Amino acid sequence: MVSAAAIAATGAFVAPQPVLAQDCAHTIGVVVSLTGPAGRFGQAASKSVELAFGDLNDAGGVAGCRLEMDLRDAQSQGSVAVDQARQLVDLVGVPAIIGGIISSVSIPILTSVTADAGVVQISPASSSPTLTRIAQEGQSKGMFFRTITSDALQGTAAAKYAMDQGLSELAIIHVNNDFGVNMVAEFTKAYEALGGTITSVTPYNQNQASYAPEVTAGLAGDPDALYLVSYPGDGTTIARTWISQGGPAKFLLNDGMNSGDFIEGVGPQFLNEAYGTSSGTTTTPSTEYFQAAYPPMSGGFDAGAPAADRAYDAAAILGLAIAQAGSAEPAAIVEGIRAVTAEGGEVIHAGPEEFERALGLIADGQAIRYVGVIGAVSFDENGDITGPFRKWRIVDGEITTVAQMTTEEVDAVKAEIGQ
């Protein structure tokens, strides 16, 4: 695996590709956080994109050319991400960008670069409801998609799961960005409607040397547990501080904290009463393919790494959309994205053999439907998807799935509490 430091030093990385008959390439921008608090997410996602593009190239390439990625480090900062995205659009001329990982990066890329430039953007991990609002207001101009569910749904799922586990009195410490603020807002509405009590809400800014003041504020209300909305880097420091200051070793965690790095950093002995929710998956042959193919090439990530599965699907959908469109023209890619995920087509799964079959069907004028690593997805008019949620907990240092919560079950909870 190319190190994050090496990538950051060069500013770009083109994934190695097999030699094909074509002497041309469709270059796709990838702007993800390779460093900073979300760095591990971006590193895992970039390897997924590399795998998906490699699989499509092994199948023969798309629209007459191979796929290449121009990888840029957002450094977990919106201003850096905008600068990198602008270079990709204005200087490289990419028709599409995969990214960002965190919402506070994806949003400025969309509003400052891709929407106005008419460039497709697809995020594998940005879950803020603000992205839905941007689309509803017409600001995304139909160019934005994401392969993760909105926090508007996940907040409700997390609230129900917390109450089911007896976590009825929580302090909240959350990252002070668009993602953290929106997640807490959605969670709070549902949690309090279900009878839960929030003793305090404390925002924090990223990359602080110490989080002792935030933890002290959170402990002041004598809560039963901590709802930590964070990323593994800062989250590890906050959880360790919480425990060292005498806080109860009971945690509710957001999807990004589903991380082996977090468990190792805090200590598994302190996390046996840690619970969390993530966007779920429906197991398919694509899931099984990814679980076998990804770890050996990822440089140390397992198939459950946050954002990894969704990044593969984002890249696969984008590549198949270019094949469907017959070109890498952005407006045609948008139509292609909707076509290759629409119901009624011949089902296609992940991997070179399946992609070769897909390309043959497309060449014959037949409709396909990609059913990916996370299952079948369909994008609504805002570029959003719906899907199940995974309820998990940490047991003896391992992240264990407890159950899935279907979209219908989430909708039933929302109806119950009048949302």
Image: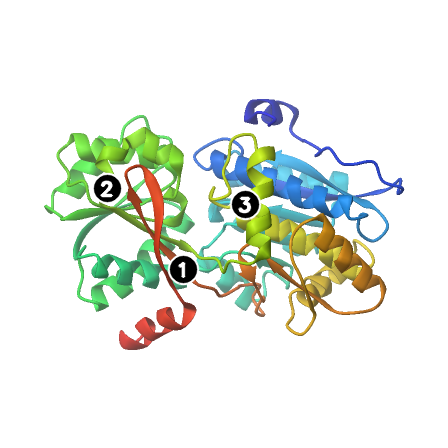
**Residue highlighted by disc 2:** 272
Q: Which of 398 and 121 is in front in this view?
A: 398
Camera-nearest residue between 69 and 259: 259
Label 1, label 3: how far apart the Cα atoms are: 19 Å
Gap between marks 1 and 2 measured at Cα: 21 Å
Q: Residue at x 52, y 33 (%)?
A: 75
The crowd level at tag 3 (other Cα within 10 Å; few <14, some 14-19, many 20+) is: some
Quarter of image, res 403: bottom left
**Which percent across, then down, holds residue 336?**
72, 63
Q: Is residue 75 visible?
A: yes
* Mark 2 neighbour density, 10 Å: few (under 14) some (14–19) many (20 or more): some
Instruction: Classify 10 Å Cα crowding around label 1: few (below 14), some (14-19), many (20 and above).
Output: many
Q: Which mark is residue 291?
A: 3
Residue 400: percent from left, percent from top: 35, 47
Q: Nearer the viewer, mark 1 or mark 2?
A: 2
Instruction: Say whether residue 7 is left or right of residue 62.
Output: left
State the quadrant of the N terminus: top right
Q: What element carries label 1?
A: strand
Residue drawn where x is 83% and y is 53% of the image: 63
Q: Nearer the viewer, mark 1 or mark 3?
A: 3
Measured as percent of width and height from the top left, residue 142 is found at: 64, 64
Q: Which image quarter holds the C terminus? A: bottom left
Residue type highlighted by circle 3 = Gln
Q: Which of disc 2 and disc 3 is earlier in sequence?
A: 2
Is mark 3 in CB contact (under 8 Å) with mark 2? Answer: no
Q: Which quarter of the figure has residue 174?
A: top left
Amino acid type at mark 1? Phe
Marker disc for residue 366? none
* Disc 1: which residue: 389
